[in-house]
Amino acid sequence: MKKILLMTVTLILLILGCSKEFHVDIEKEGSAVPNFQLRDLDGKKINSDTILNNGKKTLFVVAAEWCPHCRTETPEIQRFYDDYKDKVNIIVVFSNSGSSLDKVKEYTTKNGYTYPTYYDADGTIARGFGVTGFPFNLTIDNGKVVKQLELPTDYEMMVRETGVQ
């Protein structure tokens, strides 16, 4: 009986430990953002901790290439990135919702976007942050939630909310 119980507990811990799912309480300032895996458009994996805990504030965006508001916001993100990439982290995650990796690659290439871009192939990131609509904008500092940004988010708001200047 003890062996069965031990095996069951071990299996549960293994499953939980390997799970990619996570949750961020975006409503509570100071909530910790757990480490999660980002995958860039070329498939390279990056642990979020290496970006979110590097001493710089982060503008975190979840977008969809088909979304009209995102299409308005992404040039603003590029302008912000061009001006402040040495002072602020930029993470733009494109959703798989109604899209594909190929569509995202085409969109970012066609528009000449050079900011760090990632693809949420299985929706794990969108679920983890509780994203219910696009675009989703959040400021993060030292791996902790600062604030969800109101829409529409433009260059001036990005500057103001990240505190760069």
Image: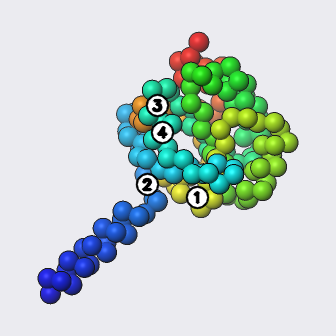
Secondary structure, mark 2, is loop
Disc 3 crowd rating (10 Å Cα; few below 14, some 14-19, many 20+) is: some
Foreground: 102 or 124?
102
Q: Nearer the viewer, mark 1 or mark 3?
A: 3
For the N terminus, the quadrant is bottom left
Nearest the eye: 33 or 29 = 33
Q: Which sits earlier in the primary sequence, circle 4 or circle 1? A: 4
Q: Looking at the picture, how far across and down is residue 71, in whole percent?
A: 77, 39
134 versus 58 height, above or below: below
Q: Nearer the viewer, mark 4 or mark 1?
A: 4
Q: Which residue is mark 1?
A: 123
User: Amino acid under label 3?
Assistant: Asn
Q: CA distance from mark 2 to mark 4?
A: 17 Å
Residue type pointed to by label 4: Thr
Residue matched to label 2: 22
Closer to the observer: label 2 or label 3?
A: 3
Q: Quadrant of residue 21?
A: bottom left
Let me know if residue 46 appears in the view.
yes
Q: CA distance from mark 1 to mark 2?
A: 11 Å
Q: Which residue is mark 4?
A: 50
Query: Which color scheme is applied?
Result: rainbow
Residue at the (53%, 31%) spot, across then down: 58
Disc sitting over residue 54 in the figure: 3
Q: Along the polypeptide, which appears first: circle 1 or circle 2?
A: 2
How packed mark 4 is, by other alpha carbons closer than 10 Å (few <14, some 14-19, many 20 or more), is: few
